[in-house]
Amino acid sequence: MRYSVVVLSVLVLCLWSCDPKTDADNTNVIGDTTQVVLIQDSLEFLSNNIKANSSNSKYWFDRANYFLRRGGIKDALIDMKSAVRLDTNNTVYRNKYADLLVTTLDIENALINYGKVLFVDSSNTKAYIGMARVYALVNNPGMATGYLQKAYEIDPHLSEAYFLEGMIYRADYEETGREESIKRALSSFQTAVEQNPSYYSAYIQMGVINHRLQNDIALDYFNTAIAIEPKSTEAWYNKGKYFQDKEMFTEAKQCYRTVSDIDSLHSEAYYNQGYMKLIFEKELDSAIYFFDYTTQVDSLHIYAYNNLGLAFERNGEIEKAKSAYRKAIDINPDFKLAKKNLNIISK
């Protein structure tokens, strides 16, 4: 079984999808407390703590979490390793360290550290789920589900375990097309949200799967995900794609505009608007604008260059069309569609 890139990405990224927000992330804190939180969540404050007492494992752990909240995986990994070295039997630190190792695909050391957690605490469900995630990543679903069963025996209400189980079944469906696997995936995701009604990632997965199966309930799942995380470009984009595939273009464009408002560098939101303009609405100037903007945001987007060529070609701008096709081919010399279009127009 070979997992798709999307499934692998979700398996890794879902490590942090359910982490509770710290006080530093809480925008409802007011007054003097806000100032204290901001100071304590500053890199200078955290680094000064370490300078004052470098043998305090908590200081290293706190700074690791600071880096992690800001996407600094490499720096977080270094500090978390120091925290574990200073407090070797702290299962919270070691679990987090193992999680970070998973994100860097250091599989061997991740397994070692989850194993050390279980040696200290054989009832640690986070470590069992971590082991399951690692085995899912290395394409061993049998071992993965075995560790999930151990976690369920300790606590049958683990939403994260049900989510991971759903991803394992989804991966099997991606590879084999087995209908039973997609049914089990949906069932596992549904159980995850029953255990945790705010499990954003599970709603996204149910929306994506139902969208693929052409079930209209997909829209409800995307809306629920948006209610949980109103500024999620992932949820808004998927909702837009749902409307686009239903040929509800006004609604789709509204969603894509929301994506762009949240993240002005989200290339696919521009690309899809260009696609609708080119293929369905026949508005060539607008299509050219959106495809060109897509290439400005993502200079390696070969499909945007190809469709920019098509839009120029249909607009009678042949030399510009050739240039766009050539750009796509320069990026990927094996891009047959652009080669075909260039050959046709060159004749």
Image (cartoon, rainbow, N blue to C red):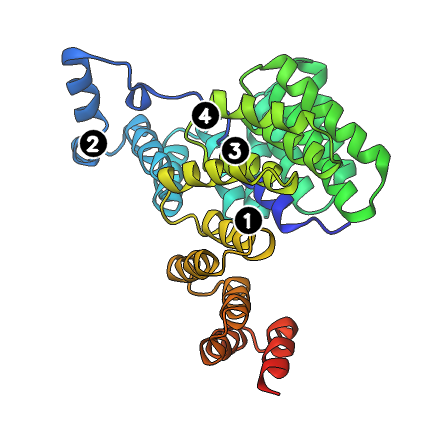
Residue plotted at (36% across, 46% down):
264
State which quarter of the image contains the C terminus.
Answer: bottom right
Amino acid type at circle 4 is: Glu
Secondary structure type for disc 4: loop
Query: What residue does disc 1 label?
Result: 105
Is residue 131 toward the left or the right of residue 298 in the image? right
Secondary structure type for disc 1: loop
Q: Nearer the viewer, residue 117 or 314?
A: 314
Is residue 11 toward the left or the right of residue 312 in the image? right
- CA distance for labels 2 and 3: 30 Å
Query: What residue does disc 3 label?
Result: 235
Residues tagged 2 and 4 counted as in contact (Cβ below 8 A): no
Residue 229: which disc? Answer: 4
CA neighbours of label 2 inside 10 A, class few (<14), some (14 to 19), many (20+): few
- CA distance for labels 1 and 4: 28 Å
CA neighbours of label 1 inside 10 A, class few (<14), some (14 to 19), many (20+): some
The x and y percentages for residue 123 are 62, 18
Residues tagged 4 and 3 counted as in contact (Cβ below 8 A): yes
* Residue sticking out furthest to the bottom: 347
- CA distance for labels 1 and 3: 26 Å
N-term mark: 1 or 3: 1
Secondary structure type for disc 3: helix
N-term mark: 1 or 2: 2
